[in-house]
Amino acid sequence: MTDARPARPMVGFFVTCIVDAMRPNIGFASLKVLEAAGCDVEVPAAQTCCGQPAFNSGDDAATKALAKQVIAAFEPYDYIVVPSGSCASMIRSHYGELFVGDAEWEARQRAVSDKTWEILSFLTDVMGYLPEGVRYDGVATYHDSCSGLRDLGVHDQPRKMLAAVEGLSLTPLEGHNECCGFGGTFCVKYSDLSNAIVTDKSEKVEATGADMLLGGDMGCLMNMAGKLNRRGAEVKVYHTIEVLAGMADVPAICKPEKMR
């Protein structure tokens, strides 16, 4: 836990495009857990994309314009918290590449980047949070997304919090630290290769015997859930924060209502 943090920090919550458009339950679950952990939370209305798709496509001008909007919207907060390792890594680890030599924006970018956290890391490393009175009866396995694991060091944090969920047990996933094949624009540019990677990942998930797959990045989870669903697997897929909030009682990702 960080000793220098405010007793009740003001958090600016960066929703992410894919959570806003495809899985709002992750956003609502995030707000519930952040408040339970002792934070005041606001969702700035001016926020938009972090710029990662443009950045990965080499469009630095569009990326810089989006980054400036994000920086201006989130400067007032003690922390910026993101329910996605890839978007959090874009703000924290890659914004610095955009403003080299621009004294004004470089300083503003560094201040925002330094206080940006992936949500599972923030809850554990900054707030020292563990869930209390949360129950989920089942066996889960865990996928570590590339950006969260490699850029931000997110590995032990979700496992520590999930160990405090009553009724839930975790079983190891072979290749838990290997890419799922999503990779943002990668799955569009190289669809055959992406499909081969997610097929291998799905086979390994099914081999665990777990009834639930968890992770911390909606892009990866949606990619794997779609493949598992097309294979007819009964494995349910949720973002970890949905379980920690006690809000995994809605249909799983890519599952229709009747297969909740």
Image: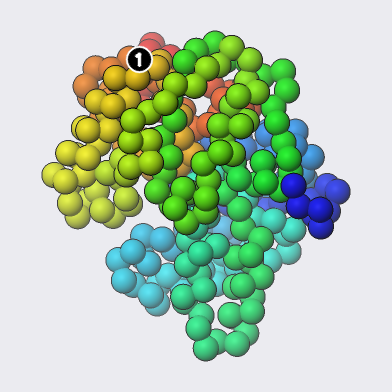
Quadrant of res 45: bottom right
Q: Quadrant of residue 258?
A: top left
Q: Residue at x 64, y 65 (%)?
A: 114
Residue drawn at (47%, 61%) of the image: 90
Q: Position of residue 175 (x, y in %)?
A: 33, 36
What colour scheme has been applied to the protein in the rendered image? rainbow
Task: Indicate the position of residue 61 as horizontal and vertical percent values.
Answer: 40, 77
Quarter of the image where the C terminus is located = top left
Q: Nearer the viewer, residue 3 or 42?
A: 3
> 66 or 171, which lies in front?
171
Q: Is residue 91 above or below residue 126?
A: below
Work out whether 113 lies above or below 223: below
Residue drawn at x 62%, y 58% is 116
Q: Which residue is mark 1?
A: 209
Does residue 112 show up? yes
Figure check: 141 above or below 184: above
Residue 22 visible from this viewpoint = no
How many residues crowd around disc 1 within 10 Å: few (fewer than 14), some, or many (20 or more)?
some
Secondary element type, mark 1? loop
Q: Which residue of the protein is positioned furthest toward the right in this rendering?
A: 7
Which of 217 and 250 lies nearest the eye of the viewer? 217
Amino acid type, residue under disc 1 in the picture: Gly
Which residue ends up furthest to the left in the rendered image?
A: 192
Horizontally, is 160 left or right of 24 in the view?
right
Q: Position of residue 118 (x, y in %)?
A: 57, 49
Q: Identify which residue is drawn at 22% across, 33% down.
A: 200
20 horizontally vs 131: left or right: left
